[in-house]
Amino acid sequence: MKLFVQYMKQIRRGAFAGAAFCITFFFSFALYHLPVKAVIYPAMLCLLLGLLFVILDFFRMKRKHDVMVRIKGLTDVITEALPRIDRIEDEDYQCIISLLGKEYNDYVRDSRRKYAEMVDYYTVWAHQIKTPIASMRLNLQNEDSELSRKLSNDLFRVEQYVEMVLTFLRLDSESTDYVIKEYDLDGIVRQSVKRFAGEFISRRLTLNYEPFTATVITDEKWLSFVIGQVLSNALKYTASGSITINYLPEGRLCISDTGIGIAAEDLPRIFENGYTGYNGRTDKKASGIGLYLCKRICTKLGHRIYAESKVDVGTTITIDLARRKLETE
């Protein structure tokens, strides 16, 4: 019905012109005192023929409209799928659409090429930077002083940022290296905690963690990144107190801290790309990318991640490891 109303608006000028012609003939015959029936009969005949023409033209337009709706997405075969040309403006429109389709395809190819070049560059850079990092770590292992321990912690942060770059690049890669199978969750958590042992010691923070028995269907490497990022944030924003890791029977892994917390107005947006909120304005080094990556990884793995927090009380990040439909991007 909506399409028919639009069509009537489109042909209203022709309808008004036809009505004006009929009225002109009527007044002309009346002016010369000619029989009015001589006008009414051909007018009615023209009206019936006009209605027939409108109905046929509407169905012709509808078929063309249906074709155009099916090919709204610009593809390589768009010009072949366009309806037959029967008007001058149709040819003009199809020419414009063909040019737009060509420009779009050229833009897509150019964007993909530039993105591939960027990924290649940063991937090479990330792997090359690991060599001097490893060298510095070996040199620091030969010393045991407050300065060397501080430098080791700073170096560990650098390694995390490099890993974050690689993760960011791999997320949008056309090929993924996911290995989805059953893993021992306690083993994954232990590995992540072990990596941050130096941070716990240097910050004098208490770790509350009891080993548990649980298996989860996931990807070990990507889930380890998520747990590591959550632990990193907990350590970053907890000056004193403790960090607690709990596993709930419902398949939820909870990581809680006694840090500065997150403002209520910031909580709904902490998983957005680049959003840092009040804490980010306080800590100028915050990038707002870590939790964004965690959210995307969990979505791809079929998990769910969410946060609960109170300012000056602490934050709890929960990773719901129950299986959900994997997202393909």
Image (tube, rainbow, N blue to C red):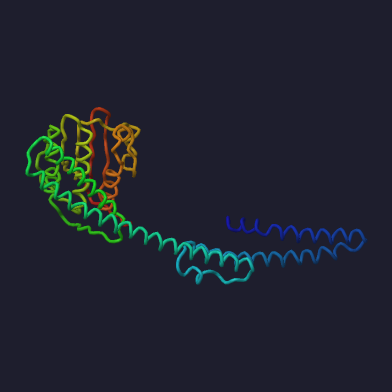
In the image shown, does 173 or 281 lie closer to the viewer?
A: 281
Residue 45 position, x and y percent, is 76, 67
In the image shown, does 124 or 86 lie closer to the viewer?
A: 124
Residue 70 can be seen in this image: no
Residue 273 position, x and y percent, is 34, 44
Relative side of 311 to 217, left or right: right
Q: Residue furthest right?
A: 32
Q: Residue at x 10, y 39 (%)?
A: 210
Q: Residue at x 29, y 34 (%)?
A: 283
Q: Quadrant of residue 326?
A: bottom left
Relative side of 113 to 218, left or right: right
Residue 79 position, x and y percent, is 51, 70
Q: Relative to residue 175, is residue 254 depicted above or below?
A: above
Residue 242 position, x and y percent, is 15, 32
Task: Give the quadrant of the N terminus.
Answer: bottom right
Task: Give the quadrant of the C terminus.
Answer: bottom left
In the image shown, does 286 or 42 lie closer to the viewer?
A: 286
In the image shown, does 34 or 219 lie closer to the viewer?
A: 219
Residue 295 can be seen in this image: yes
